[in-house]
Image (spheres, rainbow, N blue to C red):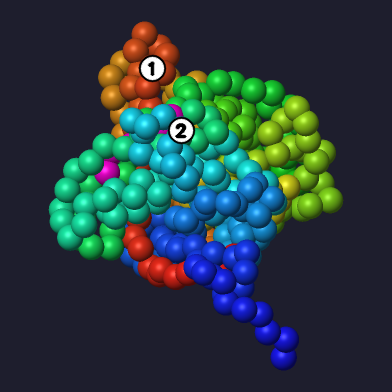
Amino acid sequence: MSGGSAGRGGWATGFMNRRYVLLDVFTDTPLTGNPLAVVLDCEGLDGERMLRIAREFNLSETVFVLPAINPVHTAQLRIFTPTAELPFAGHPTVGSAVLLARRSMGDVEEFEKVLVLEEGVGPVRCGVWGRGPKQGHAIFDVPRLPVEMAAPQDRDAVAGALGLVAAEIGFENHRPSAWSAGMPVTFVPVRNLAAMSKVMPQPALWSAAFGAPVPDVAFLYTRETTGLGRHFHARMFAPTFGLTEDPATGAAAAAFAGVVQAFDTPPAGSRRIVIEQGFEMGRPSLITLEMDSEGGRLVAARVGGDAVIVAEGVLDV
């Protein structure tokens, strides 16, 4: 067996020990929700190396924590899927906020803390509530209000790409639309839970429905839910990002505020929406979306959820 000398801080010269933490996000129960890897010691890593580490974890997203550019902020985050870097993502924001707040508080288990995390989309303000030694709840201000984008016009193409028929696309006045609050998403209303359970993406037909300029991330939603106290049931597919299906998508929930404002036209004031996602995958997740409306328009939005630490380790890279 070939060997190598152990370099300071790592297994071999040129490598370092880098701590990482695995969390389950948008849940308070380990082994549910959306898994997240957070790498804490990122000095000397460039984007290419980060992408290779993200592929090693092979989760929907991996976060790399760096010192903040602005010294009054908490940290800089770089977020990678197995195939690309993202300017913003929800479950990495929630999970990283809970972890960084938890680590900053030492042995204090119950606490409240405000963080500002620098992401590609800009500074993201987060509030965190500690709930024991391994978990917490975070809520963040949506960094950009949703803006509408080019949406699919061919309902048959959308249905075909999802393995459904055209009659299963849409409910009430809801039709396919596209919005971005930092990550462009196409939103597809699905008739009911029965239709949602039948969804089977068709890669050969995907670009016909979700090709440029339409966002190729598809967030499916229906008003029927599996539990009380919830408002929408959702699934998310992003095959071009290497994600067959995502258990919980906070960035899509942020943009979903635009959908709710456009189609449900809520009255002035604040509204709290609970979105359930990941149930078909056996990774049940709950995302909270808070919306403030005024004069018929959305003026602010926040996304929140729980996160729980499930593992810690060291990378020798």
Identified by mark 1, the residue type is: Val
The quarter of the picture where residue 4 lies is bottom right
Q: Quadrant of the N terminus?
A: bottom right
Query: What residue is shown at x 58% (from left), y 55% (from top)?
Result: 60
Classify mark 1: helix, strand or loop: strand
294 or 301: which is nearer to us? Answer: 301
Image-based side of 54 in relation to 296, left or right = right
Mark 1, Cα crowd under 10 Å, few <14 / some 14-19 / many 20+, is few
168 or 187: which is nearer to us? Answer: 187
Identified by mark 2, the residue type is: Ile
Task: Kindly identify which residue carries mark 1.
Answer: 299
Image-based side of 3 in relation to 310, left or right = right
Mark 2, Cα crowd under 10 Å, few <14 / some 14-19 / many 20+, is few
Task: Say if residue 58 shows up in the picture.
Answer: no
Image-based side of 308 in relation to 90, left or right = left
Residue 46 rendering spot, x and y as whole percentages: 63, 48
Magenta part of the protein: which range? 123-128
